[in-house]
Every structure is written in C-alpha cells, then in structure tokens.
Image: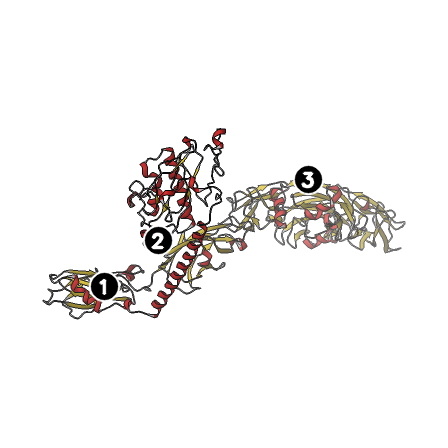
Amino acid sequence: MAWQVIFLYFTLCSVTVANPLHYSILEEMKINAVVGNLLKDLDLNTNELEFRKLRIVSHNIRTYFNLSLENGILYISDRIDREELCGSEHSCFMDLEILAENPVNVYPVKVEILDINDNSPTFFKNMFELGISESASPGARFILGNALDPDIGINSLQSYTLSPNSHFSLRENADSEGKKHPELILEQSLDREKQQKYTLILTASDGGKPMKTGTASIKIEVQDMNDNYPVFGQDTYRINLNESSPVDSLVLQLNATDKDEGSNAEITYSFSHISEKASNVFIMDSKTGVIKTREELDYETTRSYEMTVEAADGGGLAAKCTVLIQIVDVNDNAPEIMLASLSTPIPEDSPSGTLVALIHVKDLDSGDNCEVTCQISETITFTLIPSSNNYYKLVTATPLDREKNSTYNITVIAEDGGFPQLVTKKTIFITIFDINDNSPLFDKPSYIAYIPEHALVGTSLHTVHASDPDDNENAQIIYSIINTNIDNIPVTSYVSINSMSGVLYAQRSFDYEQLREFQFQVMAKDSGSPPLSSNVTVRICIIDKNDNAPKILYPSADAEGSALFEFIPHSAEKGYLVTKVIAVDADSGHNAWLSYHLLQVPDPTLFIIGQYTGEIRTGRELPDMDSLRQKIVVLVKDNGVPSLSSTVTVTMVVAESFQQVLPEIKRHPSKSDIPSNATFYLVVAIALISLLFIITVLITVIFKCRKSRTPPSYGAYSRNVYPQFTLGCPSEISDTSLPFPFSYDVCVTLDSKQNEIAYLKPVQNVPTENLIDTDDSFGGNVSTNQVTQAQPNGEWRFSQAQRPGPSGAQPAEEAGVWPNNQFETERLQAMILASANEAAEGTSGLGGGTGTMGLSARYGPQFTLQHVPDYRQNVYIPGSTLTPTNAGGKRDGKGGGNKKKSGKKDKK
C-alpha cells in the first residue's frame, strides 16, 4: 500500500511556487554538461529526490535539459543554439519548472543562454557587381550589401575592410538602428579606356575571440556617365503585419525615384540582405518593388523580420533601404492544458480538500490572447483552485462514495481572453479506490425454510444470500453459522453451510415428532481489512410426514383378561354407549386427523361407531337371549397420504349381571394368559433372586444374634443388684410374626440425678423372683419384692394410628415389623434412651406410656418395657455410643456410692 502513503502526502500538500533559480550557461555546450545542483540549491537531501519524484516540466517541444534523481544534477541533454532559440534578441532565457511531490512544490528555473562566437559574418551575396560611369567624380559613393552575424554583443559584426586599391576606399555608414552599412567611395577618377573592370575583396569582421570574418567580392565595371542615384522615400520602413494574413498578401510596395532619363531611370528592386527565414516567407517583385507573403505567418515562431532592399537604375547606380516587418499576434492559438501531476485511484475515504491533480495551462499568444481562465464541468464533487504561474489545483469538494460513483470524467475547460475566444477542453479520468465501509447485507431480514421430515443427510435446505456494495476483496463474502446449542447439541450438528455460496445442508435426518422447528444465525463476513459482518436469523421448520400410525390407548391391546371385554346389560336400548375407543397420532395436521370404523362385525346393525368420536353404541335393541357374545374389530386410521391405521379387537358380552360375564371371560383367556418361554424364564429368575436374598438375611440375623448373646464387659458385678427391664416378645407372636428372636441388654435410669446403672436383658424364662428393686435413699439396702411378670397394657402400647412419624401424617406401618438393618437398630437404641430420660425427668407429654411409644409404635405391641416400681435407673444400651456414667458403679458395704460422697457427677 505504498501508493496510499504517497497519496496521503499528496493529499495533505499545498502547491507552493518558490522564487525562481537562475543559471547561466554558454551555448553549444557539450551534452551532459552540468547546469546546476538542484539538491543543494533547493535545500533537499538525497532521500527526498526519489521520494518527492522531482521532474522537469518544460514548455518547449524539444527537451534540452534533464535531471538526475541520484545526485540532483541538472544537466544538458541536447544541443543548445542560442541563435536558433532566441534569434537576434539580446537576452535569451529558457524557462523550466521543477515539479516536486510529497508535498507538491513548483520550483521555477531560468536558464540564461550566453552567446559565444560561433557564427562568422556572412554576406547575402558572395559577389557584388557595380557599374560606375567614367564620368563619376571622386567622392562618389556606392552602397554595398552588408554582412550579417547572428551573434550578439562583441561577437556580432564589428567592422568592414576593403582590399587595398588606389581608386576606391571603404566607409561605414550607421543607420538609425545602429547597424553599419559598407559604402564604396571613389577616390580617383576612372578612365574606361585604361581599365574597364576592377575586382575588390570586402571583408566583414566580428569582435569575438578568436575573431571570425566573412568576405564578398566586388566586381566594378566602368561605364559611361550616369549621374543620378535612385532615391527611396525613407531609409527604413516599419510594417506591422497580422499573422493571420493569407498567403500572397501585400506587405509593402517600395517606390524609388531616379532623375535620370532613359535606361538610367529604369529602377530594379532586389533584396540586398535578407535572412533565410525571411526569404522563405516574403517575395518581392523586382519591377514594381511590391513585397508579398509567400507562406503563412506565425507569430509564435518568428515575431519580426528585417531585410534590406536595393533599388538600382540602368546605369548601375543603386540606393538601399531597410524594411522591418513586425508580426502582429492574433488569437490563433487555443490554450494548452497539461497535467503536471495526477493521482488516481483515490481512496473513497479521502477528506474534502484532497489534492487530485495539478494542472498547468498556457497560451502561446500574447497580450490578452494569452490570458487564460480555467474551470471544470464537475463542480459538486470536485473543485478547481487557481494557484500561481497558471497552475490550478483539482481537489475534492465533498466526501467520496465509490458505491454511488466509482469513476469520474472531469472535463477541464480553458478559455483565453482573445477575440474570438478560443477554448480547450481536456478530460481527466479519475477512479475511486474502494474502502471497506459497507457491511454485507442480506436479501431478507430473516429466512424461513420448510423441509420434510426424514430428509436425507446432505439435502439442500435453503440458500441465504448477502451482497456487499464494496469492490474486490471487500465484496467477497464468507458465510458461517454462529455456533449455538439446540437442546445442548451444537447447531452445526444439525446444519452446515457452504462458505462461498451460502447453501444450507442438513447434517442429520429430522424427525418432526422430536424437533418441529429450530432457528440459528448465519453470519456473512467480507474479506476486507478490517472485515465487516452482519447476521441473519434462519428458521428451519420441519414439515410433518405421515410416518406414525395411530396408537390406540383404550382399549389397550396389551391389557390382561377382562380388559378387552365390554359388559352390556340386556336392558340396553338403542344408542346405548357401550365403550369408547381412544386413539392418538404422533403426527400433526391432517396426518393426525383420526377416523374410526368397524372393520369386522358379525352383525353390522347391532353396533355402530362414531366416525370421529370412536364411541361404540348399540344400533338397535338387543335380541332376547340369556347371553350374547359379539367380537368386533375396530379400525382407526389417519388422514395422511398414504393413510396409516391400527386395529383393536373388542369383545361385547350381553348379560344381566357381571357374574354371567365371568364364564365367558374365563372361556376365552387372553393372549397374556398363555405362558411363554419368556415368562417362564422371568419367574425363575425372580425366584432365584428372592432365595438368595432370604439366605443373605438369615445369615446376617444369625450373626447378630450370636453377637448379642456375648456377656457384657461388666460381668464382674452381679446383675442381681439391678432391676431388670425386659424388652421381649411373647412367644406366640414371635413364632408367627418374626422369623427369629432379637433382644437387647438395656440399662435404664428413670432418675437423672442417680448414677447407678440397671441392666435390661433378654427375658428367657427368668423367674420373677430375680427382679429386684434398688433404692439409694435407704443407704443401699437391698430388698427383694415378689413381683409377677408384667403383661403389656395400654399404658405401654399405642395403636397403629398413634405411631409417630416425621410429619404426623405418615401412613401406618404394618405391626410387628422387626428392624432389618443397622439403621433401624440404631434408631431403636436412640428411641429407648429418649423414652427413659423423659420418664425420669417427668417431661413426657404423653403420660405413662411415653417411654415406650417409640418402641411399640415403630415395632408393634410385641415390644414392651415391663414396669418397675422404682423409676430412678440409668439405661445402658450395649453397642451404642452411650457409655456408663459411673464406670463399674461400685458400692461399698454400707450401700453408699463413693461418687455421692464427693458430691460430684461425671458426665460424658
């Protein structure tokens, strides 16, 4: 993008015209001779030469100078002849313009061409012939043709000399223009009889170094007497001639007079001195002295002509005059338009005022004819700003938009001030460079595609299309799907898109019953820098196909036994609703419209079915018989194409009561009653699994029972000193309800202030005499009370409705369920401990039966806690996390515990 950087500099520049540089060189210098160092004179460095693209803008047809971009040297590239360029003008300058870019500057350069003595004086004629009468007296003068030296100054013609001769001498005569004309002077009288002819050499010399000369021969013939010279009306004629004069136009008619008579008065006119250019343009009639044009005049080529005309009579006497012809400029040259600099293409994001082109206009005419005005045809987008030295800047006037107009043809119109006015037009072609300033635009705000379900993978679903008004890579669009999830599945697993064409393809086969529609977004992104993008929503709708047969919900074909039998009483009248067939279809629309038909019916008049309701009704009164059995097949079909259907068989049994129907049902077992191999294997498997479970439970229970009968660690102390709480199960209940006995050793305290521990052990035919009561308040005396084994009463049992549960509304559990896992065992332990503490502290809100509520309520009335008169016992449950508060519970012989004397209680 280097050109864009250059264009940026070009955009920000302002055209500056500096003061002109002056160089002086000699004409005829060698090619490649150095004129000057622009690098130094313009105060530039070497890097700027190539970057700023210095170049010469010359208005001459030929290129005389060139510029080196390596060192900034201005050198001569062609032969320079001052006389050819400037003619006889005293000052000769060549105007150059050095154009620099980045920023744009115009540096005027004036090169003065200095004259060298490279031209010798030349005579118009190589030989001058004079006829002098022998009667001519000494002192007579004869006009000679003058020489011409195109050089100027000291290098121009300076003097004439004549070869030595006793009869003649040379005198120089200056006219009003300061030009010297040689005249031959007769010094001695001539005698024709002695010498009839004389030959002299006339030499013209310039002042150059080295001096150059030119010669001409003078041949003199001595004639008889002719004493009057022709005379012109004036010695210099000045003529202004329009350059538009046609060929053969009259320029001037000379008229010289001679007082002689006869042949001596016959005057002949001729050019004694004329330049080559003038001789090609003008012609003179020798008899009449009329000067006419012989070709077209061009002011721009030659602005003036000078010639010397000689009038000679028949006797050889002659007179001379000078004719100066000034060409008058007419407006015959149209203005010229030149592009000094042009930058195209232009980025469309260029700001207003961006320099597009630098234009130079000129007119070769003069005066008002060369006054040029310039304008452009497009004045809205671009404007032309005049600068100096006939330069104009073409800049942008408004922001550009390539999408509206990508090219411009700007016509530059240059008009001069002459009459008639001449106009020149030049068209500049400008291209706008695209910038990625437009996002892709979809043809529609959203897309909807309808596809049938079960379409093949790879099926074309739809085509999305976006357009970008930008150009080239900025308009190259790439399509992609924005990744989202549909039911936690990436959308790209449903559809894919061709990144170039925008065609959407199915990545899977769609099922209308699972997915009816989904939507996602497609992004169109161009290839610009930076890329621009836009999104559009695409909605895919699945069109249902009739791929699902109706499903009959009732009566179900999988029902057992009597489910397919419909009971009809004998009293049923016509229109009696027997049953209703209910069916559904997973399809939708027309495919889900169901109709019901009787496919097989023994008596078509007996039953009718609603085509759209599925209601089976009696079509007439039932025949008078004890039992009537009708088997009908109902067809349910949808409205799809092709139509799908399902059937169900319904058996109608007519009887007075349902008991009459049962024999009919038993005589016709359903298909499910017929054993099959699968059913057999299933039953066997269930039996085996149940057997393994029972064996596992038995082993676990036996292991638990053995563990529970192991003596506790407190065996050193007699159990007879503690009252026994029996947590048992009556044999008649345990034998029938429980497969095995299970009991705990329980230590209960009913008074939280006491630390003594009483053990509860299993009741296995223990005599009631062994039940003892302990009272610490009597000093540890032990007495034996005859207590009969207490039977469970209402105080210790709760009905099934009184069982506590987590929310108070838990359904009642079956009574007598024994704890069957470790969790239930731990729960039992906790409930026993909580009941005992509540009874001891008197905080129970349920009366005397609170302590065992959890036991009997959870595990049934077979679990009872026998009542003991003294409630001040501690409870210890072996296997639980609770340990005795009094390790060992020792008593001394006096019946008092050592802990009571210390007045302290250990708590854990």
CB contact under 8 Å: marks 3 and 2:
no
Label of residue 738 in the image? 2
- Of 254 and 304, nearer the camera is 304
Q: Which is closer to the viewer, label 3 or label 2? A: 2
Sequence-first tag of 2 and 1: 1
> Where is residue 675 shown, x and y percent of the image?
31, 69
- Count neighbours of disc 3 (C-alpha within 10 A) and say few if under 14, some if 14 to 19, many if 20 or more: few
Are discs 1 and 3 less than 8 Å apart at CB?
Answer: no
Observer-nearest residue: 20 or 4? Answer: 4
- Count neighbours of disc 2 (C-alpha within 10 A) and say few if under 14, some if 14 to 19, many if 20 or more: some
Residue 643 visible somewhere in the drawing: no
Q: Residue 219: which numbered mark, if any?
A: none
Residue 736, percent from left and from top: 32, 54
Q: Which residue is tagged 1? A: 562
On the image, numbered disc 3 is attached to which residue? 18
- Amino acid type at image mark 3: Ala
- Report x, y in % for residue 152: 78, 45
Is label 2 or label 1 in front?
Answer: 2
Q: Is residue 279 visible?
A: yes
Nearer to the camera, 227 or 842: 842
Tag 2: amino acid: Leu
Residue located 50% across and 56% down the image: 478
| Amino acid type of the residue tagged 1 in the rendering | Ser
Earlier-in-chain disc, 3 versus 2: 3
Q: CA distance from mark 3 to mark 2?
A: 125 Å
